[in-house]
Image (tube, rainbow, N blue to C red):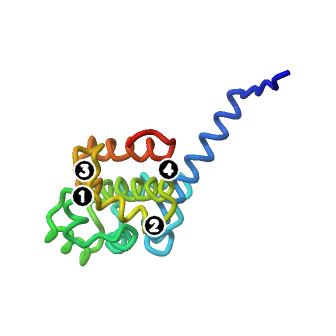
Amino acid sequence: MSARIQIDYSDICRYNRRQMVNELRAVVKGLGGRTVLGKNLASQRDLCEAIREGFPPAVVEELMQACGLTLKELADALDLSPRSLQRRRRSGRLARFESDRLYRLARIIALAQQSLGDRQSAARWLKRSNRALGGAAPVSAMDTELGARQVENVLGRIAYGGIS
């Protein structure tokens, strides 16, 4: 006799909420956490407000270390000029659009670390050409929202055993 597993709507909601919290924690950690961001970001609303205010420039250093990118590689991934990014690192806060792009990169780094197991594997994967991305390295494909979504799609296939 086969056992039947019944999953109700509340179980699915609890699972999704837990996944969102785990992703949020990983992204906030990748951005430098409370130490760098200057406040505790406990919800997506908090993170959205921090993006609107503009991240502190130290977030740039944190992401460079997290994914092993040079300033030029990071600027290319964010579709910014290296000089602008360097200037922003010395000023008070990043612009809203720069913070949004940094968040996008931090989210993908967190997904890569989750899918591939650790920080070093994720950093290597981000820099290697990928056939599923038309031969482009994932980090170079992330300069647009569509490219970032394609990278996320590839990471999803990796995480769930699909071909990528």
User: Which mark, by number, is residue 78?
Assistant: 1
- Amino acid under disc 1: Leu
Could you say whether the residue bearing mark 4 is in a helix, strand or loop?
helix
Q: Earlier in the sequence, mark 2 or mark 3?
A: 2
Question: Is the residue marked by circle 3 packed among few (<14), some (14-19), or many (20+) residues within 10 Å?
Answer: many
> Which residue position is annotated with label 4?
44
Asked if the residue under mark 3 is in contact with the one under mark 2, i.e. CB atoms within 8 Å, the reply is: no
Question: What SS does tag 2 mark?
Answer: helix
| Amino acid bearing label 4 | Gln
Q: Secondary structure at mark 3?
A: helix
- Residue beneath label 3, please? 141
Give the answer, above or below, for where 135 lies relative to 93.
Answer: above
Q: Quadrant of residue 112?
A: bottom left
Between label 1 and label 2, give the one nearer the viewer: 2
> Most extreme residue toward the bottom, as rendered?
90
Task: Say what amino acid the circle numbered 2 marks.
Answer: Arg
- Answer left or right for 7 relative to 45: right
Depth check, front residue: 46 or 151? 151
- 147 and 124: which is toward the camera: 124
Query: Residue 10 at x, y = what percent?
Result: 70, 32
CA gap, disc 3 and disc 4: 25 Å
Q: CA distance from mark 2 to mark 3?
A: 19 Å
Q: Nearer the viewer, mark 1 or mark 3?
A: 3
Q: Earlier in the sequence, mark 1 or mark 3?
A: 1
- Residue 119: assigned label: 2
